[in-house]
Each structure stands twice: as structure tokens, then as C-alpha cells.
Image (spheres, rainbow, N blue to C red):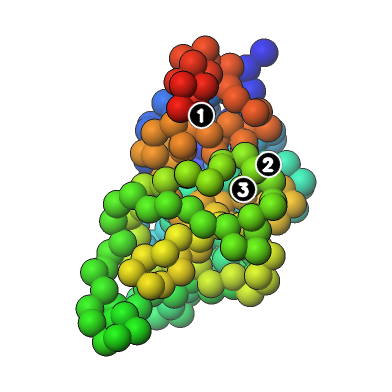
Amino acid sequence: MKKQVVIVDYGMGNVFSVSRALEFCGAEAVLSADAAVIEAAQYLILPGVGAFPDGMQELSGRGLVEPLRRYARSGKPFLGICLGMQMFFQSTEEFGFHEGLGILPGMVKQIPDRKADGSLRRIPHIGWNRLLYGAAKDGAIATALGDNFWGYFVHSFAAETAKPEHRLAYCDYDGFEVTAVVGSENILGCQFHPEKSGLAGLKLLARFLGEETTANPAFQTELAARK
């Protein structure tokens, strides 16, 4: 039986791209903004594209803030993508101070537009970047994704975790360490877009689903060919 994944459809995410990626991984995707459906989900994804305060406003307007917080406490797998990951945190400085879901401690801050030498850093951070693990190099995510994992990023703000152990991976963007993957117990978040990151992104979604590979033979064949 296919694993069913509910994707929160609140008007600010690449829901159809995420759906297709999940289906390629052998899962069934369900789009919903219904609080009851969301809380009953066995796997939940909060995607997102755009500004943090707008995202929180859309979630609040649909009555989803508290249901999402309750889901996070349920122990069931919960994945945030890009803006969705950022909203896991307590607050942001984007367009002033705004509260987030508070699922993970920390704050989302703008990527500095100046490098250490004073030269300009291009903002937003757009394109492919390689994940690095640092102290988390022996963790489950590093083991699942491997040493040559490249994700596709599109963002101007980045999460600053209050607890170092919540940062599972990062990438180097012109000398600035961008938090790329966060996690704690049932919570997993990625700043990059797995649905736009080819086989590497599918590998992360498979990890979220608790699979070493996926139910799709085409994925298994391509992954094996690239090992």
C-alpha cells in the first residue's frame, strides 16, 4: 500500500511539483487546507515560496496555525520546505519582527549582503549548492544523503538555529554558512527545494518517508547508476 502524504495547500507553495516528486517516490500525495485532514495525516509536508509574514498570515487566515503546532507535537513525520521550514522557527526579521510556528527555537534572518572583505554578496541566493555537515557528519541525514548532495536554493533569508544540534546540514554561500537542513525528532526541514533538486531531492523525500530508496523502479535504477 502506498504511503499517503498530506501537503498543506495554503496558497504559497509549489504543491504540484512536490506532489509529482512524492508520486515518483511511490507515495500518494493529498493536497489539503482542512485542519482535520492535516491533523489526521500520517506524513505531513508544509511547502512554501514567498515572504515569511505572508505565509504566517495565510496559515492564520485558514485556521491552521494551532493544528500545525499540534501535529508537530504528535510525533508523526513533518517536513518543511523552504518557507515552510523557515516558519518552523519562532520568529523572523523579514519586513519587521513576526512570529512563526515556534516548532523549533531560533530566528530567520536576512543573508548578509556583504562578505567578510566588504564586497557585495549577491542576494537572493539562487542556484545549486553542495550540502556540508560539519559536526553532524555522522548523523542519519548525512548517512542518507551522502557526501555529494547538491540542492537547489532560492531564498534571501536563512534560519539561525538556537540549538546547534538542530542544524543537520549547511552550505557555503560566498563565505556565509546557510542552514540547509534542520531536524529534531519527528521534525525535518530543508531550505532548498527537493522537488527541484533532481535525484538528490528525491533521496531526501525518500528519507522523510522512511525508505532507503523508493517504490519506483526508475528511481532505484537511476540512483544505483550514480553511486
Q: Residue at x 63, y 46 (%)?
A: 141
Amino acid at circle 2: Pro
Q: Nearer the viewer, residue 92 or 211?
A: 211
> In what element is the residue under mark 1?
loop
Residue 77: numbered disc: 2
Frontmost of labels 2 and 1 is: 1
Reading the image, the residue beneath label 1 is 227
Q: Position of residue 89 (x, y in %)?
A: 57, 66
Amino acid at circle 3: Ala
> Which residue is outermost to the bottom?
118
For residue 39, side relative to residue 194 (left or right): right
Q: Is residue 123 above or below residue 198?
A: below
Q: Position of residue 25 (x, y in %)?
A: 52, 24
Q: Position of residue 186 (x, y in %)?
A: 71, 48
Q: Nearer the viewer, residue 160 or 99?
A: 160
Whether residue 161 is visible to the viewer of this picture, yes or no, is: yes
> In what element is the residue under mark 3?
helix
Q: Position of residue 176 (x, y in %)?
A: 41, 72
